[in-house]
């Protein structure tokens, strides 16, 4: 199966005031192209941490992360930045955009080719997310949903095979949410891997595959109406110890 | 997106928050440039005065006053020095004191001095356009001396008192007349500060009268007070100086005496140089502070940049380039302000007759080389100042950078 992003035995812990907190332990996760994958779980269960590890923003303490077939373990800061730019697209819950720059410039930001090419492509993408008219607006002049769509356009500027989003609909009304989810579906239909972290049942219902991170349990669910119930993965999350 | 165009766009977008630093650096640069510009112009006026005249080729030989072993500077000495190799000409000058009797009843003591045709004083008021050569009986005095304003006597026959020899160490006053045809800027201190320039024959007549020597014998017995030996080229000056000294005469090059500036201008020059240091410190401290504060405020922006694939080095380049642009803008504004400030200060200085000849012209800026150097240094200092805080900001992990929401 074409897993575009893969976590293999990933562990992460933080030490807070002398107490070690294991946030992730021995996590196995594959995100495939052509599917919308949802990562759900209660607050503090480590969803963002896992997304950042898969997004190469935070290194895991143990285990391996694969982008395509390539193991990124041991890659330098620069190489990881290059992978983020070319292979991954990000949409965060909020504060996605540089406040001092127009929507268009925010979209062009990660593009490294010729300026004119970047701007042409950015305009196409803004059009795709329905914001062609707003190219010259500052983020403060856009609604929350519009800002998220600009962020999505930016995530696509280098045509990455995988798009990661952390609570992308967290601050949106259901109408804006539908627009954004429709766009994510299109991306999956183009063959990209889409990984969404969410609290929102509407979003997890919409996903093809759902992984639940929970106290002591990491489950994979596949919504009944789409696919038969999936296999369980090993329980491996969030145990606290006072080592 | 190219980091340089991003930096430029950031500076434009964040200009409100950068205005303090720009104002600080540009005002410091302006004051510094204004002062240096005035000093530079004054030095330029002095130096070109030296070059246009034969002063940079001249060696002066003063009459040995306290040294009986050295021979007098007679007309034979003049002929002898003129025959030395690489010597173009020898000019002589005599000097003798006399008094000017003012209407108020005071006496102003001046030194009648032979003028140098090639190096006439900066005349501020005169009866005719081409004042030199002077005719016998004409004098050019300092515009002010010993509290008396001689400028208002220009064009008048003035009453003077010369001295007649009675016996060794004793003389008697003789009143006479001379015509004051012009006055010069009294800061001109190439000769005695109270020098009154006159034709050679006039000075020699008064000097002979004072010495008790007959006028026709005076030059071969008592001789001149100073000889100026003019070398063929400036490069010959050391060799000529040496051969004059080998003949037993004390010789000094004229240029050393000429390059000195009036005290106020010397001070302005020093102020400019001190401000240059102050500017450097201000620019550095300002850059450190502003970069530190801004990058804390912009942590989340830096986090986004890194998340979407900017390398640490690119973020660092972006932040430092931003500050370099700020430094460049500040320096350029400083140049404009400095030109205005220098022009204004020069206008004030022109109010003083003494300083006016040194601060001609409206745009007083230092040379292009100095300007470029200042521009480059400002940019460099600001960029270096921003380096440490920018590196700290750029090195943050994207996750940490975005945490402070
Ligand atoms: N840098 C850090 N230092 C210490 N602890 C951290 C750090 N980052 C995360 N944690 C801890 O790790 C745990 C998981 O955090 P994470 O942000 O991944 O949770 P989450 O599932 O995304 O929660 P939410 O749904 O509220 O966003 C939390 O208990 C949090 O306190
Ligand atoms: Mg989270």
Image (spheres, coloured by chain):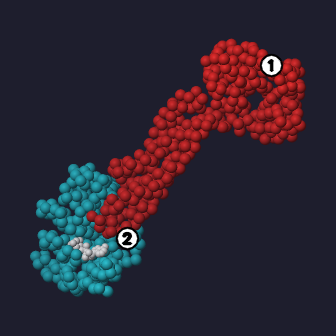
Chain colours: A cyan, B red
When the figure is inspected, residue B398 is found, relative to residue B219, above or below; the finding is below
Of A242 and A66, which appears nearest the observer?
Answer: A242
Q: Residues within 10 Å of mark 2 (few under 14, many from 20)?
A: many
Q: Residue at x 74, y 18 (%)?
A: B161
Question: Mark 1 or 2, which is nearer the eye?
Answer: 1
Q: How many marks?
A: 2
Q: Residue at x 67, y 37 (%)?
A: B259
In the rendered structure, the answer to whether residue B184 lies left or right of residue B207 reads left
Q: Residues within 10 Å of mark 1 (few under 14, many from 20)?
A: few
Q: Are marks 1 and 2 in contact (CB under 8 Å)?
A: no
What is the chain identity of the residue bearing mark 2? A
> Quarter-wise, where is residue A41 in the image?
bottom left
**Does the rendering let one see residue B362?**
no
Question: On the rendered image, what quadrant is the C terminus of chain A found in?
Answer: bottom left
- Residue located beneath label 2 in the image: A80
Indicate the position of residue B391 as horizontal and vertical percent values: 43, 63
Q: Residue at x 82, y 34 (%)?
A: B65
Of B27 and A158, which appears nearest the observer?
Answer: B27
Question: On the rendered image, what quadrant is the N terminus of chain A found in?
Answer: bottom left
Indicate the position of residue B241 as horizontal and vertical percent values: 80, 39
> Quarter-wise, where is residue B144 in the image?
top right
Report the Cα–Cα distance between label 1 and label 2. Answer: 102 Å
- Residue located beneath label 1 in the image: B172
């Amino acid at each position: 199966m074409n897993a575009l992003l893969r976590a293999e035995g990933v562990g992460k812990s933080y030490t807070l005031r002398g107490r070690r907190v294991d946030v992730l332990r021995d996590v196995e996760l594959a995100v495939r192209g052509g599917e919308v994958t949802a990562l759900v779980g209660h607050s503090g269960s480590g969803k963002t941490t896992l997304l950042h590890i898969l997004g190469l923003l935070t290194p895991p303490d143990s285990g391996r992360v694969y982008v395509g077939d390539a193991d990124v373990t041991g890659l330098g800061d620069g190489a990881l930045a290059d992978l983020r730019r070319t292979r991954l697209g990000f949409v965060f819950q909020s504060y996605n955009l540089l406040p001092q720059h127009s929507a268009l410039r925010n979209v062009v930001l990660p593009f490294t080719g010729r300026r004119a090419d970047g701007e042409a492509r950015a305009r196409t993408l803004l059009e795709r997310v329905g914001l062609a008219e707003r190219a010259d607006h500052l983020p403060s002049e856009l609604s929350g949903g519009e800002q998220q769509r600009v962020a999505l356009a930016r995530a696509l500027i280098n045509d990455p095979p995988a798009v990661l989003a952390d609570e992308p609909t967290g601050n949106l009304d259901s109408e804006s949410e539908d627009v954004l989810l429709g766009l994510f579906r299109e991306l999956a239909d183009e063959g990209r891997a889409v990984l969404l972290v969410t609290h929102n049942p509407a979003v997890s219902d919409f996903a093809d595959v759902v992984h639940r991170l929970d106290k002591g349990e990491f489950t994979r669910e596949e919504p009944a109406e789409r696919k038969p119930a999936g296999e369980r993965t090993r329980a491996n999350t969030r145990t606290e110890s006072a080592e | 997106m190219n980091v340089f165009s991003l930096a430029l766009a950031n500076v434009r977008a964040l200009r409100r928050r950068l205005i303090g630093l720009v104002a600080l650096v540009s005002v410091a640069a302006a004051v510094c440039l204004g002062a240096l510009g005035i000093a530079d112009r004054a030095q330029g006026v002095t130096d070109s005065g030296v070059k246009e005249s034969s002063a940079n080729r001249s060696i002066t030989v003063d009459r040995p006053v306290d040294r009986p072993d050295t021979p007098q500077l007679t007309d034979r000495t003049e002929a002898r020095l003129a025959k030395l190799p690489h010597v173009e000409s020898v000019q002589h000058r005599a000097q003798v004191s006399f008094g000017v009797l003012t209407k108020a009843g005071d006496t102003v003591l001046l030194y009648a001095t032979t003028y140098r045709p090639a190096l006439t004083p900066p005349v501020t008021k005169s009866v005719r356009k081409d004042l030199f050569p002077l005719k016998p009986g004409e004098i050019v005095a300092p515009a002010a001396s010993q509290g008396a304003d001689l400028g208002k006597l220009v064009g008048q026959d003035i009453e003077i008192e010369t001295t007649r020899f009675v016996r060794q160490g004793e003389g008697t006053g003789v009143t006479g007349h001379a015509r004051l045809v012009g006055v010069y800027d009294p800061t001109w201190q190439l000769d005695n500060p109270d020098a009154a320039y006159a034709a050679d024959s006039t000075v020699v007549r008064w000097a002979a009268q004072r010495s008790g020597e007959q006028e026709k014998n005076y030059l071969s017995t008592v001789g001149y007070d100073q000889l100026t030996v003019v070398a063929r080229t400036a490069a010959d000056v050391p060799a000529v100086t040496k051969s004059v000294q080998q003949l037993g005469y004390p010789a000094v090059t004229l240029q050393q005496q000429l390059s000195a500036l009036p005290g106020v201008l010397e001070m302005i020059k020093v102020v400019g140089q001190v401000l240059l240091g102050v500017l450097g410190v201000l620019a550095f401290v300002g850059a450190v502070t502003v970069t530190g504060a801004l990058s804390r405020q912009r942590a989340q922006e830096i986090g986004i940049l890194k998340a979407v694939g900017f390398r640490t080095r690119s973020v660092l380049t972006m932040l430092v380039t931003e500050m370099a642009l700020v430094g460049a803008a500040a320096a350029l504004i400083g140049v404009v302000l400095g030109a205005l400030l220098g022009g204004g200060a020069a206008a004030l200085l022109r109010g003083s007759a003494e300083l006016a000849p040194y601060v001609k012209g409206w745009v007083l800026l230092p040379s292009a080389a100095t300007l470029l150097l200042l521009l480059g240094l400002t940019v460099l200092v600001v960029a270096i100042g921003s380096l440490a805080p920018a590196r700290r900001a750029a090195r943050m992990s994207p996750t940490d950078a975005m945490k402070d929401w």
